[in-house]
Amino acid sequence: MTLQFTVSPDFPADRISGWYIFNTWMQRTLGTGIHLEIYNDFGAQRKAIADDRVDLIYANPYDAAMLVREKGFVGVARPRGRSDEVVVAVSAAGQVIEVEALKPGARVVSTDDPDIEMMGMILLEPADLNRQNVERKVCRTYVLVAKALMNGEADVGFFLADAYAKFSPLIRDSLRPLVTSQIHVVKHLLLLGPAARQHLDTLRNGLLAMADDAKGKSMLDGLGLDVWEAVDREDVEFMIDLIDTLVE
Amino acid sequence: MEPADVAGEFREYNLAYYDGSRRRVLVTDIETPFPEGKLIVSRTDVAGVITNCNQSFVEMSGFSEAELIGQPHWILRHPDMPPAAFKDLWDTVTRGTKWNGYVKNLRKDGGFYWVYATVVANVRDGIIAGYTSVRRKPSRTKVREAEALYRTMNQG
Ligand SMILES: Cc1cc2nc3c(=O)[nH]c(=O)nc-3n(C[C@H](O)[C@H](O)[C@H](O)COP(=O)(O)O)c2cc1C
């Protein structure tokens, strides 16, 4: 049986070959055929999950609840130290210097990354903003989110902090960060579904050993990760409980 | 609470708890602002005894982690909070339902901090194994509304 593997659509575009190399490594390590399917957006990926067309997934933390609690996935590993944090920023040309200065009706721009959108909206709550009283605009990339702010098409934007940090000085100088999250526990993770359960230990052991040799290190480099750490059931359940407190 | 731990001028209250016990607390008017971008997280067992907390929780409460773990969560109870709010919290979460509310918490130094808190049950194998509370920065409008509401509730 060929297993189906997919990656959270928010991975940086230049990492695509890294994920194909990773998939080849998984096939060799597990001794089974694995097909990597890349979905264009979260909607298409969730549909595939709902239809049981996913067995292995490098998942956005926001989707972990559905995967674990509805579909019976278990945590294999996650990249150490890599938490998803959000930068809430405005155009540097404007007058707003704190979140509290934003007003109902504000035009909010982000990508469709669900965890970033969730945390961004929470950081707007001190201004009494919520999904009902803001206007939403969704862009395909963080550079486009930045441009929407610079062009005055939106009042405030949400960025994955790692993406914001990689912006050119030109873009960064045009933006003003108002607040950066320091939540630390919301992280992408590799999950394995019921049909792949027999491979859990082999896969986890392989991932944990990946940083031990040059070949594994270069594969991690290709994914933009440093080292995998194991996750146990309670680590995953705790993250899901925490995210549950942040969603409506 | 001992006067030596308290920063600034204080008032003394004698709080009665749900379980019948009482505790003397010393209270000041000094507010500690919510830490920007952070969440204050704690977990309890089914009885509300603190089992885990994050660094923001430690910093905001003014207690050390060792002083918090193993303590009942009412260690943070502020006398301005109406008992009905916590009764509602417990009635809600023991049903396995999510609870939200604005809470004024007491610090070890007698000061206070406002949070918007959400509490969920930690359901494991179909059983409630404990609770997680996550607090975020509240809007000042909502804090003023809660202040007025809690004052009325405490008078009633
Ligand atoms: C997960 C969890 C978190 C809680 N957090 C707080 C808190 O931050 N402050 C507080 O005063 N009570 C908190 N409570 C409620 C207390 O357990 C307690 O009900 C409250 O302090 C009032 O005390 P009483 O019920 O003995 O009257 C929490 C309860 C749970 C289950």
Image (cartoon, coloured by chain):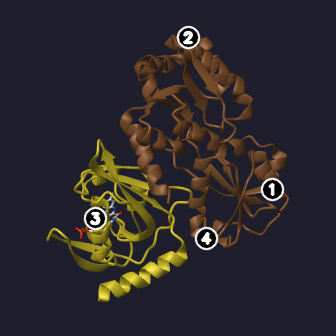
Chain colours: A brown, B yellow
- Tell me the distance, in whole angstroms, between the alpha carbons under discs 2 and 3: 51 Å
For badge 2, the amino acid type reads Arg
Is residue B50 or residue A243 the one in the foreground? Answer: A243
Dot 3 alpha-carbon crowd within 10 angstroms: few under 14, some 14 to 19, many 20 or more: some
Q: Nearer the viewer, mark 2 or mark 1?
A: 2
- Tell me the distance, in whole angstroms, between the alpha carbons under discs 3 and 1: 45 Å
Q: According to the image, label 2 marks what residue?
A: A28
Q: According to the image, label 3 marks what residue?
A: B90
Chain where mark 2 sits: A
Whole-percent x and y of residue B131? Answer: 32, 53
Q: Secondary structure at mark 4?
A: helix
Dot 1 alpha-carbon crowd within 10 angstroms: few under 14, some 14 to 19, many 20 or more: many
Q: According to the image, label 4 marks what residue?
A: A127
Name of the residue lying farthest toward the front: A51
Q: Are marks 1 and 4 on the same chain?
A: yes
Q: Is residue B144 visible?
A: yes
Chain where mark 3 sits: B
User: Residue B17 vs residue A174: left or right?
Assistant: left
Mark 3 sits near ligand 1, with its Cβ under 8 Å away: yes
Q: According to the image, label 1 marks what residue?
A: A148
Whole-percent x and y of residue A215? Answer: 62, 12
- Using the image, determine if residue A164 lies above or below residue A202: below
Residue appearing at x 53%, y 75% in the figure: B140
Q: Secondary structure at mark 2?
A: helix
User: Residue A105 vs residue B55: left or right?
Assistant: right
For badge 1, the amino acid type reads Ala
Is residue B127 or residue A171 the one in the foreground? Answer: B127
Chain where mark 1 sits: A
State which tag comes first along the sequence, 2 or 4: 2
